[in-house]
Image: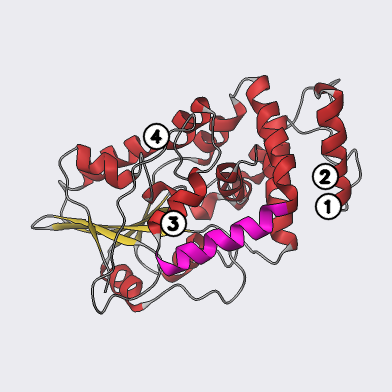
Amino acid sequence: MRNRFLTATATALALALAGCAATAPMGETPTLRAETPPPGAIPGPGLWRVADADTTIYLFGTVHALPPDTLWFDERVQRAFDSSGKLVTEIDIAEMAAQGQNLMAAGMLPEGQTLRGLMSAENRAEYEAALTTLGLPLEALDRMEPWFAAMTLSLLPLLQAGYEAESGVDMALTAKAGGKERGALETIEEQIALFDTLPMAAQLKLLDEAVEMVPEAATMLNAMVAEWLEGDAVGLATMLNEELDDPVLYERLLTQRNANWAEWIEQRMATPGTVFMAVGAGHLAGEGSVQEKLEQRGLTVTRVWK
């Protein structure tokens, strides 16, 4: 199985663990509501609004790494961003560099174990072939736990294809935030724990899927970014929904987090002001999305087209 969900998630995690992709578990076919842009709509990444008399929260779907000079900050996004007094991201972007050592420490195997030593003979051969394709020594990731090696293998083809964290939406918005108040939905430690506490069998499955994705990772993300730039949330969700069959990851990485964030939004609506909330685009598309969780709580979510 080539897990497109994994690449979207891994890109974010390896760039400080920030994001995920909306997916439907166990081969379930999601019911997606197609959206027809109204006359005068501005094509661009999806932007939504939840509002009452004195509070507005904008929901903006991000891509955590992009090729340089990708144009996405259109006039809709700028108006919403400029009117907001607070920027909320999945994690505190300013803490990312400081947490690099913690990430490395969490992702290392105990002394005496090696990554390749945990694999079956067949999976090891495929893994070593992927390392050769990427130009890495066979022992390059031997000290890593499988989940961390999976993240690394998912990210490397994208970096080789010219994607940069510095060009990603999260970092760009943080740089533009100036004097805005900042907030985060999760800590880096919490995002690390999402993967680090997976059973070893689940981690090895994650790694095997990452290995299978190496040849097409950059092509796949290019297609996902194209859907994102067009503002086609349904198309993006459909692409991400393909071939995920792991309910443990689905619950851990998507639905529970989206439910937590919807609860945060509902509680924040009691405080006046305008908030710009930027999270991985996959969280705002398809079954189990943040919007769906909000509607289940009785909140109205409106797409901002222009």
Residue at 48 percent across and 63 percent down: it is: 227
The three-letter code of the residue at mark 2 reads Ala
Please report whichever mark, 4 or 2, sits nearer to the chain's N-terminal start: 2
Please report whichever mark, 3 or 2, sits nearer to the chain's N-terminal start: 2
Crowding around mark 2 (Cα neighbors within 10 Å: few <14, some 14 to 19, many 20+) is many
How far is mark 3 from mark 1, CA to CA?
Answer: 30 Å
Q: Is residue 105 visible?
A: no
The three-letter code of the residue at mark 3 reads Gly
Residue at the disc numbered 2: 130
Residue 135 location (% of width, % of height): 88, 53
Residue at the disc numbered 1: 134
The three-letter code of the residue at mark 4 reads Thr
How far is mark 4 from mark 3, CA to CA?
Answer: 19 Å
How far is mark 4 from mark 2, CA to CA?
Answer: 31 Å
Q: Which residues are magenta?
A: 216-231
**Secondary structure at numbered mark 3:** helix
How far is mark 3 from mark 2, CA to CA?
Answer: 29 Å
Which numbered mark, 3 or 2, is in the foreground of this view? 3
Residue 74 location (% of width, % of height): 38, 76
Residue at the disc numbered 4: 255
Crowding around mark 3 (Cα neighbors within 10 Å: few <14, some 14 to 19, many 20+) is some
**Secondary structure at numbered mark 4:** helix
